[in-house]
Each structure stands twice: as C-alpha cells, then as structure tokens.
Amino acid sequence: MNSRGLNRFSLTAHLSYTRRVADMRASAMFEMGKNGKKTGLGRALMNNKRTVKNSRIREFERIQNADDANGLEIVHQKGTALQSIIETNDYDAFRDRALMEGRSFSAVRGEARLITSDEPISLNYTDPSQVNDRVMKLLRIPYRPNWRMVSPKELPKVEEEAFLKWRSGMAAIEQTDNIELTPFEKSINVWRQLWHVVEKSDVIVQVVDARNPLLYRCKDLEIYTKFTAKRLREYYQQQYEEKNPGSGRTFDYQKQSMLLVNKADLLTLEQRQAWADWFNGQGISFVFFAATVEESDEQADAPMEAAVGPNTAAIVTRTDIIRILHSRRGSVDRPWMDKYPYTVGLVGFPNVGKSSFINSLFTRKRVATGATPGKTQRYQTLLLPVDAETGDADPMVLCDCPGLVFPTISRTREEMVLAGVIQIDRMRNYLTPTKLCLDWFDRETLGKAFKMTFPKPGIDDDPDRKMTPHEALEALARARGFVHHASVADCGRASRILLKEVVNGINLRHCHMPPDSGKVEVQVGAV
C-alpha cells in the first residue's frame, strides 16, 4: 500500500472513530426513564422546537383561510379566552371596521402626507345640560337583530352588520356633535354574551357600586330588556299555538329589571337613606346588598332590620335577597316553566362584584373572583338549589354575564380608572388619575389612610395649595421604599398603590350622593 492509500485509510478510520465517540457522548447525555424511554434536555429542546414550528404553521394556515371572517371572530374561533376591547387606537379601529366590512387593501407607495384634525372637546361631566336630548337618545347599546328573520347560518353576518352600524353611529356622535366618548366595549363577542343573558333571563339584575350608582347604571339596558321581552312574547305565543292548536291560551310575558346596589357596607345609613329616597322618587326597583358585611355593620343597622326588603335603605341578607328574587317568579307568564326554569341574569360593569354576589348566595366559591376587572370571561349558568331557610320549593338559575363597559359621555377616563372599570396595572399615564385623586382627598385624609405625613406647602406657597401628583407619589414611594437605582422614587408603583386604595374603598372612600343633593362625601376608614 502506497503512502497515499495509507493516508486515506488513516483519515477514514479517524473520521469513523470521531463519529463513534460523538454518538457515545450524545447517548450518554440521556438517562433511562421509568418507562424505558430515553429522556434528556436535548430531546426536550428538539420536541419543543418541533411543537413551536407546527403551531406557527397551523397559525399561518388559519390566517390564510380566514379571508371571509372578521377579525373579532378570530379570537372566538381559536378557542382562547374572550378578549374585551375597551380602548383602541386609530389603526385598530380602522382595521376592525375593514375586516367586518370584508374589504381588502393593497400597499401603494407614494408621497407621504400629514393628516390632521381638530381634537374633540371633552365635556364637563358635572354639566349634563351641554348634551342635548337628541344625542342622549343616540347613545344606545347595540341591539341584537331579530333571529327569527334569518337562518342560523346567516345570523352571525347580520349581527356583524348591525354591530358595524352601531359603531359607525358612535363615531358619528363624536364627529358631528364634537364630543368625546369615554372608553366603552368594542368587541362584538362580549356584546353577544349580553344578548344571550338578556334572552335567557326572566329578571335582569343590574349590579352597581354603591359609592356611585349612576356611573354604573345603564338606562338603555332596561329599554333593551323590555324590547327583548316583547320579541320573545310573540315567539312564545307562536310556538305554543303550533304545539297546542285551539287552546286559546295567551301569554303576557314581561322581563323585569332591578338594581342591586352592591358594596352597600361602604355607605353610612344616612347615605343609603338618601339614595333610597331618590330611587323611589324615580320609580326604580332596587335593593342594597353587601357580599361581605362585617358584624359591626349589621349591628349598626339593627334599628332598620325590621324593614328588610326591596326599596328600603336596609342592607338585606343572603336569605332576604333570595326571597326577593323568588317573589318575582309569580309575575313571569311564559310557557314551559317546568322545562326552562326561572332564570335571573346578572349584568353590570367590571369590578362591581357580580361574581362575589354569586359566591355569597351559594355560601361557597362557585365562580372566580379577583382584583383584576373582567375575571368572568363568558356567561355561565348556575343552579341555585332549594334552600330550607327561604322556604321556596322551586330552584332558580343564575346567569352571570361578563363585565361590560357601557358607552357614556358623562364620565371622564380618569374617573373610570378610579372606579375600577379600567385596569390600573395596564394604564400608562398615571399622573392624570392621581391628579383627580388629589382633588378628592386632601393631604390630611391621605395621611390618615396611609399612616404617614405628606409634604406641606412651602413658606412662600399658598397654605391651601394642593399637592401635585409628583409630590404625593414621591412621598408615598419613599415612605414605602419604592426606589430605582440612584435613589430615584418609583412614582409609577406608588400610583398603583394609591389608586387601588381608592378602588377598594377600605381606607379611602369617595361616595357620591344623589343628583338633588349636589355634593359628594369623603370618608376614611370604616363606616
């Protein structure tokens, strides 16, 4: 064998030896599991890489095949959690509308132009006279189209067209009347949850926060409830006559509405009495309730416990509210009550305590609750069993609707943040909500709530000058030890602590009184 053949043989042997050593080292990385299969970090990484690749391929195919579907349906079809859309930018609004209209666009390169428009004028929410009656009538919630006129296959498209028309009407209010709407729900899937709850329920209970009931109350929801009852009354009558010809039976089906003023333990007895007088004067059926009422609150209201019931200033108990809801069963006149049981729907803004109210009725946790608004993702029905304390032999179904932000023009965005409607952890501008908080509470009130001393005005300053947001947040941040590098105060974290205290209402309470009184009351600590 010549030298060339020897060198070639040596190189081949060396490569073979190197390959065997690499295989042995790779196999040594794995350990035998209990099931006899090899496991290890390398194989786990390869499996994860393959899974991610396959998911991306499926996502791409889904998007390619979704040309005829609107963008709001993608989240629903994918099977993920229901996504609430309250605030959108100009691009998102344009994209959603284009997808719902089924329009397609192609990129055209040209000369760039700057488009500007006059900013809308924000109304002062304390002066409702600036808004005329015509605008207030146009400010409605989206109504579901009549499902009896179209096939089930065509119904989603008809609903999307009606919803698009409603969105266009909301935009026209801002442009034509030169006003600015506060953030409201813009996802059709969330509004569909409301439509289903109203249709399934015999009584609609609108849950509001006792500290500011009118902020959370939606008048048009009560109108839509009556509108849906009329539509169902005709449907029930037709279906009954088809199955029972010649019976001559007529039904006068009506859906009832009631206001449940939750968190009533945050109000004093005098405040609840003022609201009770105002509700009775307006002809509104209501009841005060508290999901977690302390024993001291119950003892404080002992003189009024003899008047427990609806339309009074007393805080009703769990047994009382169940009796009140069961008492409305007798006025429900519809067929097949044995097949479709008596149902009570719960509707309201996020973070008003609908889920906590349900858990208090069941005396155990049945639905998820949390500090983050919008914990309930989809409407759910719960069967309330027969309770020996109430004496009712028939069961009752509770239908819980996800939190909805109804459109309004009488509230500012900062007030909605302090009301817990907009998530505090997701806000970017924390100075304006803090400014409103400082308008509500002075430095002495804040000092008692946080058990600290806030900076006072300087010698040359006005002694009645209020703190600036930066002064208050910097003092709170340093008192709690919230600092960045180089001893810079973390004002963003301090603002979340301050705003959440206002939302919880345990140490800081800003309670609104009825419109006739024209005042608000500030409290610190327990009532």
Image (cartoon, grey):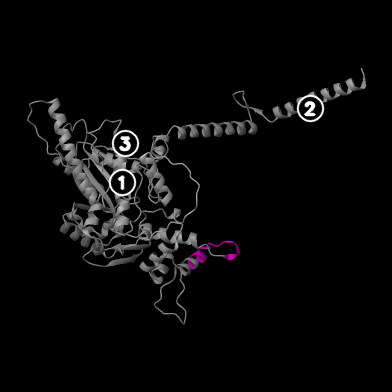
- Which residue is the extreme one toward the right? 2
Image location (x, y in percent) of residue 335: 15, 32
Name the kind of residue labelled 3 in the image: Lys
Q: Would you say residue 291 sits in the magenta stretch?
A: no
Callout 3: few (<14), some (14-19), or many (20+) C-alpha neighbours within 10 Å?
Answer: some
Q: Nearer the viewer, residue 199 or 269?
A: 199
Q: Residue at x 10, y 25 (%)?
A: 245
Lateral position of residue 460 relative to residue 171, left or right:
right
- Does 187 sit above or below residue 427? above
What is the number of the mark on residue 18? Answer: 2
Q: Would you say residue 479 sits in the magenta stretch?
A: yes
Image location (x, y in percent) of residue 73: 38, 38
Name the kind of residue labelled 2 in the image: Thr
- Which residue is the extreme one toward the front? 111
What is the number of the mark on residue 80? Answer: none
- Cα separation, mark 3 vs mark 1, equals 39 Å
Q: Residue at x 25, y 63 (%)?
A: 128
Image location (x, y in percent) of residue 302: 23, 58
- In primary-sequence order, the first of circles 3 and 1 is 3
Please state the extent of the stretch shown in magenta in the rendering.
475-487
Location of residue 461 by image quarter? bottom left
- Does 503 sit above or below residue 324? below
